[in-house]
Amino acid sequence: MTLLNNHRTRRRRLGVVATAAGLLAALLTAGPAVATPDPGDTPATPDKVSKSKAAEVREAIESGDIPGKDEIVHSDNITHVGNTPKDALPGTNSDLAFQGKYAYAGNYDGFRVFDISNPKAPKTVAQVLCPGSQNDISVSGNLLFLSTDSSRSDNSCNSTSQPATEKSSWEGMKIFDISDKRNPRYVAAVETACGSHTHTLVPERRNVYVYVSSYSPSATFPDCKPPHDGISVIKVPRKAPQKAEVVGFPVIFPGEGPDGGGNPGAPTNPGVSKTTGCHDITVLPSKDLAAGACMGDGILFSIKDPENPKVIDQVQDNVNFAFWHSATFNQKANKVVFTDELGGGGAATCNAAIGPNRGADGIYDLVGKGDKRKLVFKSYFKIPRHQADTENCVAHNGSLIPVKGRDIMVQAWYQGGVSVWDFTNSSKPKEIAYFERGPIATDALTFGGSWSAYYYNGYIYSNDTAKGFDVLKISDRRTDPAKWIRMSELNVQTQPDYFGWWG
């Protein structure tokens, strides 16, 4: 593919992504402004690479195999509309949610609200300081939900880090009232076993159900002991969110042993995560379905009874999948894309040594009917552009681009950038567009890049962990029909039926 912004052709062997420094600005907090971002909730410091590897990165840049440091490159059907750097929240940027003309951006130090009525010039409406990784974020009506998956001294936005071995430590879900977008108001908190790494909304008229995914129990953690073989279900009354409470802990992996019936991991399955809970769940309410990415297992659920999700099928890939991270249904609900977060998001896995089938997407067809449906593996997809050994890169969060009759997805790959790919043919997926930055560093493996890349109302929005909030525009006959689809709200893990109203 040719590039719009320089004269070099991007070769296929190496290269991509970013970093940024936060500038101080006015801060709207959900409590007294004495809270400070917590260094304990930030990624590890950069790891130096060998001199030979650093030399290889420099040579790759000089030869045009990868972009230069922080250099932006993209396919000729992508336009970089703009970038909004970090501001008052210097922590790691995380997930995104959307509602009307607003985008909500999670950050390990809290969250930021953007007015995106003009996507070319997003305006900051509010920044809320409320530390606690990873601040996974969702919205529904006047409520905003924020996950806390690090042990805190209490449930306030002024809390500090505290060991999980202490009984008084708190982790779980925080709930804000966002009826006034400029002044989000903290209204409730619900503690959940092992915290909340991610969460997924199952919204109903009177209540919002929240599926809380968490993992990694320990006998030394008073509030997170094994077996931790299920998910927490929280019920939140819309008119009285302060009454939110855990209403169940359905067991997903029944079985013998200290961790139930999930994947045992090593030594039985070397290189595969032992299943001690779920990492993320995506629901498709229009079809009463959910797909769970649960460490060493991929799960298909029925959610006809939202308080009691029922497992329909369970699959493993003990050859190429190390950590089942997230899931996406296609629109017809006859496919599921699972991602493998090999290396936990902090490793350089987009290279020839790792290959095309690890740290990739796994495409599964759904065959059969009703509760007898099965997940059947079809193929892997991985970005075709190798990255440097100083760039963390692996399959991460993405969403459908709503085109009737086609299966097209946009996806974040950390320092692999943003990829748009077509999996209409489950056995032959292919990339059709990309956006990326050159390495943050040439002498150290440095964490950065796109955490989430989602399509919303004609644009692609990417929350770069270091560089900030990017807006992209794709112009391609294969994706152009999506421009006519308009959503009033989008939480990607609560997948909408984009075409339901068309019959």
Image: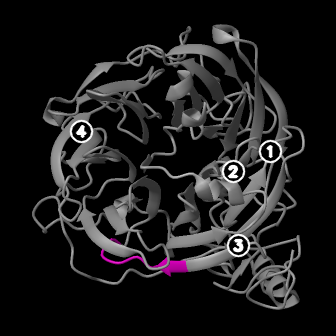
Q: Earlier in the sequence, mark 3 or mark 2?
A: 3
Query: Which callout, 3 or 4, points to the residue nearer the camera?
Result: 3
Q: Earlier in the sequence, mark 1 or mark 3?
A: 3
**Do the CB atoms of the residues marked 1 and 4 lie less than 8 Å apart?**
no
Nearer to the camera, 488 or 109: 488
Classify 392 as above or below 367.
below
Where disc 2 sits, the SS reads: strand
Amino acid carrying label 2: it is: Met
- According to the image, label 2 marks what residue? 409
| Disc 3 from disc 4: Cα separation | 49 Å
Q: Residues within 10 Å of mark 3 (few under 14, many from 20)?
A: many
Q: Give how far apart the Cα atoms at labels 1 and 3 are.
A: 19 Å
The residue wearing badge 4 is 166
Question: Going from the N terminus, do you reach mark 2 or mark 1 first?
Answer: 2
Tell me which segment is drawn in magenta: 82-89
Quadrant holding the C terminus: top right
Q: Residue at x 37, y 34 (%)?
A: 194
Residue 6 magenta: no
Residue 144 x/y as whole percent: 29, 47
> Rounded to the nearest whole Å, what is the CA distance between mark 2 and mark 4?
43 Å
Q: Which residue is mark 3?
A: 78
Q: CA distance from mark 1 to mark 4?
A: 47 Å
